[in-house]
């Protein structure tokens, strides 16, 4: 059974977001849900499914999804809390599509809330850091620095090429007044090169800012979507790939045997949607770090392994380029909206709501998520993709 | 192994032993690098777990690793993620691939940061943290 265009995204919404928002994780979640339901032109009683990202920063919290339903006053017939890191928002849209087709529910809110320093939660060392923290290796960025170093070694990728990712997405954010970095204005490659080293070879501007936020999208059947407020944005293709191999996120010519191919996530989605790379009008790549975008371009087949750096440097990801990407600024400059921002921006582009940054006649969007356990042993990776059409 | 932070002494994080990892850390305490080897297919794996990811055998033995390997990737920390490491900055964190195959995070010691390179041959050394924990670290392999 091909689920192509059986469901659509009909509502998107976000809480107030920024570096520090004095609201609880739950309140940020609820605000995102409220705005997404309102954007769809629905009432809360029209919603009968709720999916959410388990908020790992809150520690172990049983029943988070049920309590969110209670706070929203929604009686759901299908709910689940999920965690595959930054790949989760897309995975929720996929699961919602499957649940609606299975007859479990009709209209699903997929949501998340994220607060970087929640009140009342003691700081603790997450499990899985026993083999990194004692060496001074903590947080999400350092492993990406290892990946970047390896990519530079294998393919000659440069820091300036990574800088081109940051510069491009900041330029896009400067056309998005909601973006966290909007007020900071544009940056140049020299600004990137002069930004301080965090973990060599990655600099401050290779890194997404921290953001407190909540957000949601509403998924319903294509049939129902036609009678709602906005032009429906159809879910045409979806894919996932999860590495069974430790620490190797890309095809490594030294280790061809058994090397994980995250590209399956795109192959499955392209096949379902019946589209090819040249059909993609806009892309939203999960960009917690600049190097990720370069690796995703290679992994998903937009260029050959090792050519991601020059692909970006040639301006192909810019508005007006051949693959306009992260048109709202991405995690790097719109803010760390956990990948939900990527889905929402694809929806806005396909609705034609983007004003100055609108890609003319955008009809097909490719959206990616990336996560898994990208810095806790055993380090491993989850990729998720969506192809959205209007 | 202690850093200063607003007048408090904050120790560096140390590993918490689990059912899976206890034999590894006990080996380190004796300055032996033990890694798991599948008793059925011979596959070496790290981190420790109860099942071979190649053949799904639960028949596992702890084997003494050669302690030799090479640098797979490396980084230099300029940012203080944890106050206990503030005085160490800039310090390196590398990933070493053991001759037996597994990859692991470590620090390269007895070597300037700028002299580290991918492919550098290294050998294990043990740094005693306290009475129970010794950390395997790696130094350039002497010719």
Image: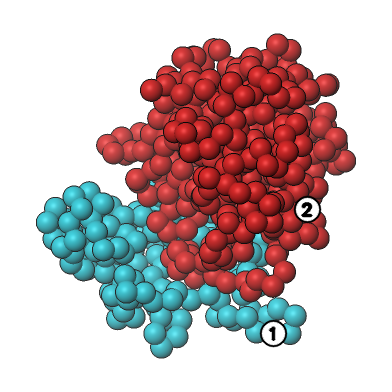
Q: Residue at x 12, y 56 (%)?
A: B40
Q: Nearer the viewer, residue A327 or A228?
A: A228
Question: Is residue B74 visible to us here?
Answer: no
Q: Position of residue A223 (x, y in %)?
A: 59, 21
Q: Do the residues marked 2 and 1 share a common chain? A: no
Which residue is painted at 50% across and 55% down in the image?
A375
Of A331 and A81, the residue lying toward us: A81
Q: Residues within 10 Å of mark 2 (few under 14, many from 20)?
A: some
- In the picture, the disc for residue A19 is 2
Q: Is residue A375 above or below residue A127?
A: above
Front residue of this view, candidates A192 and B139:
A192
The answer to whether B133 is drawn above or below residue A356 in the figure is: below
Give x and y (percent) for residue B85.
61, 71
Query: Could you tell whether A269 is left or right of A188 in the image?
Result: left
Q: Is residue A182 left or right of residue A337?
A: right
Image hue for chain B: cyan
Q: Secondary structure at mark 2?
A: loop
């Amino acid at each position: 059974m091909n689920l192509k265009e059986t469901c659509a995204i009909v509502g998107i919404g976000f809480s107030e977001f920024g570096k520090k928002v004095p609201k609880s994780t739950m309140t940020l979640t609820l605000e995102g849900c409220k705005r997404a339901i309102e954007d769809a032109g629905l009432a809360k009683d029209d919603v009968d499914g709720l999916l959410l990202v388990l908020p790992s920063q809150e520690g172990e919290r049983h029943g988070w999804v049920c309590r969110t339903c209670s706070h929203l006053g929604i009686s759901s017939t299908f709910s689940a809390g999920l965690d595959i890191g930054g790949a989760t928002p897309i995975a929720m849209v996929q699961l919602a599509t499957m649940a609606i087709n299975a007859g479990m529910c009709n209209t699903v809110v997929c949501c998340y809330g994220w607060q970087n320093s929640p009140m009342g939660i003691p700081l603790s060392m997450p499990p899985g850091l026993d083999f990194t923290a004692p060496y001074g290796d903590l947080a999400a960025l350092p492993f990406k620095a290892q990946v970047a170093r390896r990519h530079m070694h294998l393919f000659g990728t440069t820091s300036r090429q990574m800088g081109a990712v940051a510069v491009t997405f900041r330029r896009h954010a400067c056309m998005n007044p909601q973006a966290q970095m909007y007020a900071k204005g544009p940056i140049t490659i020299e600004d990137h090169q002069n930004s301080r080293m965090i973990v060599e070879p990655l600099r401050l501007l290779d890194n997404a800012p921290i953001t407190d936020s909540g957000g949601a999208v509403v998924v319903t059947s294509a049939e129902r979507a036609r009678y709602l407020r906005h032009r429906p944005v159809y879910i045409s293709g979806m894919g996932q790939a999860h590495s069974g191999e430790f620490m190797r996120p890309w095809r490594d010519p030294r280790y061809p045997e058994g090397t994980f191919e995250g590209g399956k996530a795109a192959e499955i989605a392209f096949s379902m949607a019946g589209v090819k790379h040249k059909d993609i009008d806009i892309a939203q790549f999960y960009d917690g770090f600049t190097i990720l975008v370069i690796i995703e371009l290679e992994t998903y087949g937009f260029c050959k392994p090792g050519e991601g750096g020059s692909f970006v440097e040639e301006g192909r990801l810019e508005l007006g380029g051949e693959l306009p990407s992260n048109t709202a600024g991405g995690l790097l400059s719109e803010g760390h909206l956990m990948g939900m921002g990527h889905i929402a921006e694809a929806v806005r582009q396909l609705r034609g709501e983007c004003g100055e940054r609108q890609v003319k006649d955008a009809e097909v969007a490719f959206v990616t998520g990336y996560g898994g356990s990208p810095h806790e042993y055993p380090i491993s990776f989850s990729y998720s993709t969506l192809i959205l059409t209007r | 192994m202690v850093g200063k932070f607003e007048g408090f002494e904050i120790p560096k994080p140390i590993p918490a032993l689990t059912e899976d990892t206890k034999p590894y850390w006990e080996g380190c305490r004796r300055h032996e690098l033990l890694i798991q080897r599948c008793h059925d297919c011979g596959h070496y794996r790290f981190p420790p777990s109860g099942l071979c990811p190649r053949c799904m055998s639960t028949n596992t033995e702890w084997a003494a690793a050669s302690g030799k390997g090479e640098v797979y990737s490396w980084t230099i920390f300029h940012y203080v993620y944890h106050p206990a490491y503030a005085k160490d900055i800039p310090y390196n964190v590398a990933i070493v691939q053991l001759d037996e195959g597994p990859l692991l995070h470590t620090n390269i010691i007895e070597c300037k940061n700028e002299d580290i390179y991918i492919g550098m041959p290294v050998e294990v050394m043990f740094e005693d943290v306290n009475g129970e924990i010794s950390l395997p670290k790696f130094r350039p392999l002497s010719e």
